[in-house]
Structure formats: structure tokens, C-alpha cells
Amino acid sequence: MKRDIGNALPGTEEQTDGKSMTISQLCATLQKLVKVPQVTDVWVVGELSDFGLRGGHCYADLVEKDDDGKPVAKIPLRIWNYLFNSLNAKFMSGTGQPLSTGIKVKVCVAPSIHKLYGLSVIASDIDPAYTMGDLMRRRQEIIDRLTREGIIELNRRLAWTDVPTRLAVISSPSAAGYGDFLNQLFGNEAHIRFTVKLFEAMMQGEKARPTILAALERIAAETDRWDGVVIIRGGGASLDLQCFEDYELAAAVARFPLPVMIGIGHERDITVLDYVANRRVKTPTAAAEWFVKRGESLLNRLNSIGSALLQRASDIMAAEKEQLSYFEGVISVFPLNAVRHADSRLVNSINSLSNLTTRRIVPALEKINAMQTQIEHAAQSALTMQRDRLNADERLLKALSPQAVLARGYSVTRCDGRILTDAATVENGAQLTTQLACGEIKSTVS
Amino acid sequence: MEISNTSVKEMSYREAVNELDTILREMQSDNCDIDRLSAMTRRATELIAECRNRLTATDEELRNILASLAPKAN
């Protein structure tokens, strides 16, 4: 049996009779017919579906869809293993993802007809820029729609609690990224306590979208139990991110009532979810680090409040002690000062008093002295006057005294001690005594 | 400012930190009451200890949590 059916031509030895040809002959003829320049090495665009690898060869369908996403044309695509690795590598370096179902591609192909497998196109080159542009365009469409609907910022505006330690994680339990996340989270040196619950979901392929949406719904039913949502995967070799480029998923994340953190790939893997999620981190490890750092900064704040309190308390005590010792110092000096003060006041009083004495008493004394002199003079003159007067009186008295009268020749006659001034009053025989200046004469009336 | 006597266990983390801030401000103000200095310091210490307690766990606790969460695949 001939191996190269390509050489078989109509009407050659394979023909069994003049009227019919074998399928092999037909296919060989068709294969010749399709090898024409119009369809050889032409660039064609379509979406990959049913992507699969067998024996290093790539088998997929290239599908054309209408605006509603309904397939309107389809052709099998083959990339033989001698080319697949280099084309896939070229594609990955241009788009950040491997060839897989759901991706729109622009490939350089030539048609081929196989007697068993029929028509297919064989790829010889690929243009990652087209896919990139398409991805960007689709992502932009989703972003535009979310923006139009006013929900794109919703989740990004949510604030994390002071201590986001209760985390609802959406991941695949077997994902290496989930293990990394847990180890990082619970191995933190500050011993920050986290509460984590896994809400299982597929993190790649067509089931990713519905399972992640379902997980979000389960978390939404118990939002009071969680501080936030962490969607992680990573570590795997396959980086099928197409499943995340979805409007419904993005809208669900945007509208989610708790802040959502996304860590679904490596540095350059960006999906539309990164535009709507509250925070985006490069890896699950980085996600855990963010929570640990947040906890640590709270611990640091506690520590700094503590040391500020301590500092302040000891400052206050120091100031009070200083004030006390000031008082102590003052108290030892104060009484002395007070005594000195009182003393000097006393001296002042004495001085003022003596001034007062000088100013008031001396003149008074002088006045008294003067008065004394005056009084002495006055007394003297009064005495003199009295003496003169006495002398005059004495002289008068002397002149008027009975003795003087007697001396001048007068006499006093008494009868029975009574001075006689009337002779008629004397009876005969009465004894009379007549006093003269010198001596007396006794006589009898006859 | 009245020193609260609410049990720190019954307070939310936010409330506890807010009270710490208040105490600190009070102590930093010029008319800090010396008679209450030690009461304030004691209260603040309680609050800090409680907050730190809530944030952190012992080694053993962490190991247990991690063990209960580890992927069953292993």
C-alpha cells in the first residue's frame, strides 16, 4: 500500500474501474486541489475550542462566532509537535498565557485533507499581538460596561476593618497557592491570629466561573463572619486566566459587600478582576503578607501607644517630683525669710516710732518745759504778789490791832469778860477790868 | 474624663483602641489629674494587653489552626 497518497492522481492505478474512485483517491485528489496559493499560508482568525494535546500535537477547533457568541463556522486546527512548542512559547511570551480553549487567535495556516480525519488547517505561525489586542478589547468592553453601570469602583471603595483577621478564601484546596497562603499567614512571627475558611472553587477552566460565583454566594450568606474575601490560586504551571475575563464574575466581585483581594497569578497576569477587586496582589504569599503586615502595624501601634503612655506617665511623675523638690527647697528657706522679713518690719516700726518721737514728743517736751518755766515764773510772781500783799496787810493789821490802839492810849474795859461799850449797862459794884497797853487795872463801879 | 470600668473583654477592638487614644490624649493634656494617673495607666495597660491578646495567638494555637486547614491532599 502506498504511503504517500499525495501522489495519487485521478485515473491512475488506484482507480478500480472507469466510473468510480476510492475515498483515498478522492481525498488524495482533494488534497492536491487545496494546495493552492489562495489558501496556503493565509492568516485566519478564530476562537480556540476543544483544545487538547496528544502526543505533543495540538488538536483544537477554530471557531467563528457571531455577535451573540453563536458558532457560525468551524474548522479543525492542527499544530504538529515539531512546531507546537515554539509556537506556544511565542504565544506565551506575547500574551502571558498558553494556548487554550476560549482564546481568540490569529494563525497562519494551510488546509489539508486527510482520508480519515477530513479537512483541517495546519498552523505554521501564530500572531500573539492579535490575541493580546483581542483580550484587551474584550477586557475593555467588560470594564466599560462595569463603568457604565457605575459598579466598577464599588468594591475598591470598601475599607478593610482595622484588623482583617477573619478571611474567607476562595481557592482550590489542592492548589499550591492555597498552601503557600496558609503557611505564610500562620507562620507569621508576630503570632497574629487569623481565622480562615476555604470556599472551594475550580481555579481554572470552564468550571472556574460558575464555581467561583457559587463560592461568592456562600460567603455572601454569612458576611458578618468575615472581614474580607481572598481569591487565590497560583503555583501551577498552567496559567489559564481566560476564565477570569468574565463580566458576570467581575460584576459579582465589584458588587461584593466585603472587600475582595485577588491573587490569582504572577506579576504580569492581569485579568479584569484586578480592575474591580479592592486589592490586587501578585501571589498568594503576597496576599498573606499583606494581612500579616496589617496585623503587625496594629501591634506596633499598640506598642507605641503603650510606650507613649509609659513615657508620659514618667514625664508627669518627674515633673511632679521636680515641683515637690522645689517646694521642699522653698519650705526650708521660707520661714527664715519670713522671720527676716518680720524682723526688718519690726526694725522699721521702731525706726518710724523713734522718728515719730523725735518729730512729735520733742516739741511737746519743749512745750512742756516752756510751760514749766512759765508756771514757775507765774508762781513766783504770784508768790511775790501775795507776799507783798501780806506785808501790806500785816502793816495794816499792825496799825489796826488793839495793841496798837492801846498803845496810842486807848483801853478796853470788860465786865465779866464782856467788852463794855455802854456805861448804862454797868451796875454798881460791878468789877471791871481795864486793859491798857501795858498791864491792867481792876476797879469797882461806884 | 471618666475612667471607664467596662470590662475590656466586652469591648470591640475599635472601642478599646479608641479608649486608649482618649487616655493618651488626657495624659498628654496640660491638666492631667495626678490622682488618677495610676488608674489611667492601669486601665491603659489592660486595654493594650487585651488588644494584643486578640491579635495574637500562641505557637500551639497557630500550629493547630494550620493543621486543621492544611490541604487534605497530603
Image (tube, rainbow, N blue to C red):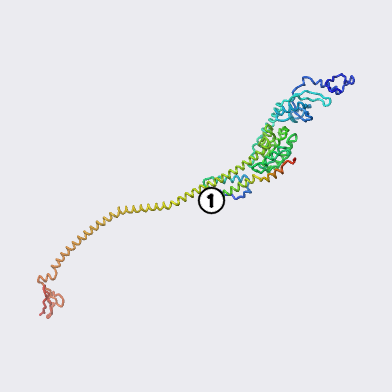
Residue at coordinates 75% horizontally, 34% vertically from top-left?
Answer: A206
**Residue A291, quarter of the rendered image:** top right
Quarter of the image with the N terminus of chain A is top right
Q: Which residue is most to the bottom?
A: A429
Q: Could you tell me which chain the residue with mark 1 belongs to? A: B
Looking at the rendered structure, the kind of residue marked 1 is: Asp
Residue at coordinates 36% horizontally, 53% vertically from top-left?
Answer: A347
Disc 1 designates what residue?
B35
Q: Position of residue A105 (x, y in %)?
A: 73, 27
Residue A387 shows up from this direction: yes
Q: How many marks?
A: 1
**Residue A40, quarter of the rendered image:** top right
Please, what secondary structure does the residue beneath circle 1 have?
A: helix
Nearest the camera: A379 or A18?
A18
Q: Residues within 10 Å of mark 1 (few under 14, many from 20)?
A: few
Determine whether A233 is above or below A324 in the image. Answer: above
Nearest the camera: B26 or A308?
A308
Determine whether A360 is above or below A423 in the image. Answer: above
Residue A73 shows up from this direction: no
Quarter of the image with the C terminus of chain A is bottom left
Determine whether A3 is above or below B48 in the image. Answer: above
Q: Position of residue A94 (x, y in %)?
A: 70, 28
Describe residue A174's horizontal placement relative to residue A4 as left or right: left
